[in-house]
Amino acid sequence: MKKIFGFTIGGLNHKILQLVLIDMLVLVAVFIGMMYYKDRTLVDVVESTRKEQQDAISTISEDTLNQVIEGSMVKTNALQSHIADTMFRSIKKDVVTLQTLAEEMFRNKDIIVPGEVSLPDPANDGKITAQVLYAEGVDYQKSQYLPIASRMTDTMAAMYGSSEYKTNVFIGFEDGTHISVDSISSDKFDENGKLITFPVCDRPWYTKAAETGDVCFTSVISDMYTGTECVTCSAPVYMDGKLIGVVGIDIFLDAVNEYVKSSFSNGSFICIIDGSGKVIFSPDDNGIFTVDVSENAEDLRKSENKELADFVTDALREKTGLRTVNIGGSEYYLAATPLSSVDWTVVSVVIKEVTRVPTTQLLDEYDRINEKATAAFRDGTAAAAQAMLIITVCVFVISITGVVHFAGKIVKPIESMTAEIIEGSRTGKLFEMKDEYNTDDEIEVLARSFDDLSKKTRQYIIDITEITKEKERIGTELGLARKIQADMLPNIYPAFPNRPEIDIYATMTPAKEVGGDFYDFFLIDDDHLGMVMADVSGKGVPAALFMMMSKILINNYAMQGGSPAQVLAQTNNAICKKNDEEMFVTVWFGVLEISTGKITAANAGHEFPVIRKANGDYELYEDRHGFVIGGLANTKYKEYEIYLEKGGALFLYTDGVPEATNTEDEQFGTDRLIEALNAQKELGPRQLLPELKVAIDEFVGEGEQFDDLTMLALTLI
């Protein structure tokens, strides 16, 4: 903060000035708002009315167009569907008539005089002629069906001539023979003048009728001789319950295709979709639907565009009414009416954007008229703003003069208080209440608060000093306890300089200042070495004290000559007598007979030991566990024996090793322990344990050590 001509820049004077200026700005803004209210109200009314009128024009126009389009499209679509449906129903009726006639004739074949039908003759082009066709390798002259069916040809010829859409009326038989009634014979021959064989039973109209057992329509197929797209209506013919043939009528779709293509006009058109969801007729370059009658054509019912897929699915089942569907980023009006005679549907399409053109033109003209009127209001508003600017400058000058005069009287006690606090932070002098702070307002409350805080700070310093001393004392005692605990464990190596046949080494890393794990090894006599690995429940000083007591008891009972099972039982009973805290310890205790390598051991709920045979790998030895020490009085423990060969090794540990956890909450585990041991299996105990500790630390990384890490390794040399 700086003082300029008695005015503190950045201080309370400055902030009060800012506050007053803000208040004045608000007042001026309100005043200006009131002045502008009348003009702005008029402008807002104009703008609001303009928007409402635009919305009304847009809504009414679009609703009207939608109603017109919906009524027109739905009715037109239904009419187009009816026209197509009428043709297919007529064809279907003729096919049923043929089916009935054929079955009646074959039911009465014994009383019908056989007739004859000739092979195709190019000279008959232009004449309605019945012609025999047959599949490759078939002798049509041996057919039992053709002579009977020949009596149907007059009826078939009459049907053929009754409609310009019928291009072929036929009956095909299961023996590979076929009678076709049409007016084109030359297309049945190849370029060498040889009659082309006809695979009767393999044609789609035959297989579909045989499969459904009823009148059916094929999808769009190619005529075998002309290659022209057509649809065939066919029906099975049965004799004595057996399928003997299929009757049918081919319908060339050139007229339908031309009608659909010519429907494209001013953003609207029609298309036809078959029962498999494929577009079979559609105008070229319509922008959304592509005709593809191949087997790989897209089934629009499975389109990734869900709106389109749902529409096509519904369109094949029922009349849809008008729907809006977004295709390729553009919106389209769609309406569909299915054909009742064949599983197709006729779809009418209108680009929605085209219907909005009249509304858009109307809104553009309306905006032009309104912009002209709005410009007049803007000119009047600019003149009023200039006048208000002059008024605002005058108000600012008056406000600043008043603030500079009165702010000094308000801020002076606070400046004095601030100076005293700054001095106290530099010299340590505590804040004290003075008469000049008795202002009967918030300044007095603040001063009394500082005075009270100063007194409490003085007491806090006294208290924190005592706490620090106590903490230092406890830290010193814990350090001494840790040293005592470490001194109680064997820590001088080599442990038995006069016994070169054994090499033993152990480490203990507590999780806190003192730990609950402990190990021990001692010579019971010249040929027997006792080894202990134990883990006390809990951590800290209580666990350390319990550990010392357990270690001493195990050592004393072992030196009295008891077996491992007896030593654990005696230790357990001694601890259970006075264990009000209900603490317990897991113990593995073993006695090595140095001369033979035999280890006699017992396990009181501790981790499995790890054994390595001479020149072999470390392996987990899953011994039988007894109950923990201190858990239940008079517990019996079982012993077992392990034999170490010369060069063999024993590894003992507490649960802090396999349960070491990394930052991903993953434990080190016994598998990694065995792997780490075998990676350094050639090392002696003194070198092995530090390497194993490195492996554990690398796995844990930044993770916290939650448990003591205690390990013991022995090699029989």
Image (cartoon, rainbow, N blue to C red):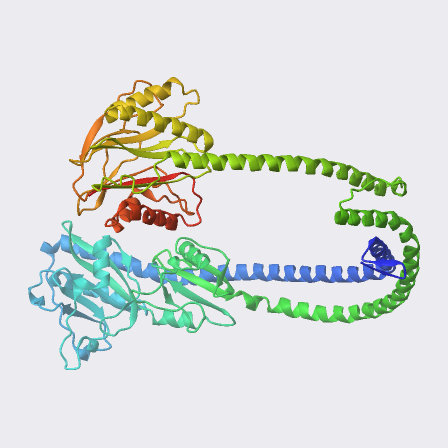
Q: Is 656 above or below relative to 132? A: above
- Report the quarter where the N terminus lies: bottom right
Q: Is residue 512 visible?
A: yes
Q: Is 71 above or below relative to 715? A: below
Question: Which is nearer the eye, 548 or 324?
Answer: 548
Percent from the top left, x then y, of residue 705? 43, 42
- Report the quarter where the C terminus lies: top left
Q: Residue at x 9, y 63 (%)?
A: 143
Q: Is residue 514 visible?
A: no
Question: Which is nearer the eye, 257 or 291?
Answer: 291
**Total numbered badges shown on the rendered structure:** 0
> Position of 243 compared to 33: left or right?
left
Name which quarter of the figure residue 555 lies in: top left
Residue positioned most to the left: 142
> Position of 464 compared to 428: left or right?
left
Name which quarter of the figure residue 232 lies in: bottom left
Q: Residue at x 37, y 49 (%)?
A: 699
Percent from the top left, x then y, of residue 477? 51, 34
Percent from the top left, x then y, of residue 174? 14, 59
Percent from the top left, x then y, of residue 34? 86, 57
> Position of 416 compared to 138: left or right?
right
Name which quarter of the figure residue 224 lies in: bottom left
Residue positioned most to the front: 498
Question: Which is nearer the eye, 367 or 72?
Answer: 367
